[in-house]
Image (cartoon, helix red, strand yellow):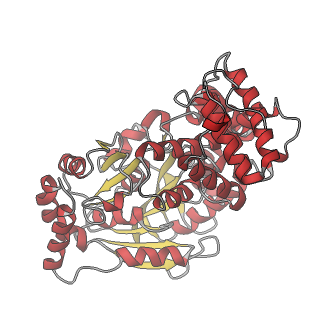
Amino acid sequence: MADRTKGDGRDGGGAAQRPKESAPRAIAARVLARVWASDAFASAALDAELRRAPALDPRDVGLATELVYGVLRAQVALEARIAEFAAKSRWTTDPLVRAHVLMGAYSLCFLDRVPSFAAVSEAVDGAQAAGGPRVGAFANAVLRRLAAAMEAGRPPLAGAVVASAPGWLRGALRRSLGRAAAEAFLSAGPVPPPTGLCLAPGEDRDAWIEALRGAAPAASFEPGRVSPTAIVARGAGDVRRLPGFGAAWIGQEEGAQALALALGARPGERVLDACAGRGNKSWILSRAVLPGGAVDAADLYPAKLSQLRATLSAPPASSEGAEGAGEEGAGAGEGAEGAEGAAARGGLERAAAFVRETYAVDWTVGAGDVPEGYDRVLVDAPCSGVGTLRRRPEIALRRDADDLPRLADLQVAIARRAATRARDGGRLVFAVCSVLREECEAVAARLADPAEDDLGVRLEPAPFDAEIARELAGGGDAFRLLPHVHGTDGYFAAMFIVRR
């Protein structure tokens, strides 16, 4: 095999000095292979791999993470560059080989901190281990040519990310946001986004930020930009190990917090979380209705409701137990003393908040056993997930234009049926983690159209009555959250009053 460490003239060494496949690249390759071969979500697969390597240096964790997300976001552009130097595409059929070749290309094109000789060498080692010597020789030849081409200048990553988005998606984003905003949305960072922490009502955000900084001094904790309950964490690892988890706060993306708060739930009200999933928004709502209110949760999938019930459906046996839980949450971990008092004071209120009833229901068929008379209903409907692209870049490769009308029909059906459970004059928020007009304004317009009313309820667009949503909507009845504007994932929410 040719000496592959001499391709760019910067290494000064021979093949005997070639580094072996690095741990971060091996981890990233396994994650990418799972995404392509079994439709795994990159974030979940990466988390699982990193949990198996707890001793991995934080810099290597960062490299593995960047390689996974970088390759997925720029995949189409990277494959196009490789095609300039490769006559055949058989290398793409083996997921591990494909991963190592694309990681090598990504490093050559976009990672200034990785020398070209190292990027080529490690990619070849990985490809050869996965596919044998002939595959290794192919990777060596192709990546050396790409390294030479990069000597003339590296392309901007943002351009590669935009170019890698499917044509239908670029067109839909331009129709929805405008050309410049569409490109800003696609290339928005940071990637991956920070982890959001959601504080329970009454918790002191400044005190908890100081407590968390003390517990994890190498991490970054800052107040959220949109949600008053949000703390944004970077480099914190598994946040479940931090003080206060599950008592004073939970992990939840900041924009998702804003959707729950936009419902405007108030003490004493009856609230339905109609598409509750595992219950993060129910957790927020159950605290907002105290004292005297109640939250019920519905979802299509019983397994998700079982997980929700395990954490949110059991009120405390006594105030003593609640206070103890609060103190334990604040005291776990060095440096948590600053929040201990706040956690203990809020312990009873936190523990007393719970989901009253859960209902497994397919809203497209009927309302099942869900009762009527709710003051407020939150419909966080199934959607394309386009708003989460910087967190789940693989979504762009799994959706197509034909999905949008089908999803829009589903969203309308779910929201209309859920609206029948609200009282006359009650409020409903329709929300999706998408920014596409077909799933946002177009669906909201259909919900407000009397011609589509076949269930005996009317949905009238109305201004939000929650302060956070009034500000985001500028006093109107709908708003979008965008990563390049608000720093959150992308979302849309619209408020309606239910009339019978």
Q: Residue at 57% across / 53% down in the picture?
A: 27
Left or right, residue 138 beside residue 311: right
Up/down of 443 relative to 176, above or below: below
Left/right placement of residue 103 relative to residue 258 reads right
Q: Residue at x 31, y 80 (%)?
A: 314
Q: Would residue 453 be visible to someone looking at this image? A: no
At 56% from the left edge and 62% from the top edge, which residue is drawn?
A: 415
| Depth check, front residue: 163 or 83 | 83
Task: Examine the rendering and report whether any part of residue 430 can be seen.
Answer: yes
- Residue toward you, 157 or 434: 157
Question: In the displayed structure, does residue 85 sit left or right of residue 183?
Answer: right
How far across and down, in percent of the image, does residue 222 sit?
29, 41
**Residue 35: % across, % down:** 65, 55
Query: Which quadrant of the rendered structure holds the N terminus?
Result: top right
Give coordinates of residue 324: x percent, y percent: 15, 73
* Residue at 14%, 77% in the rendered image: 319
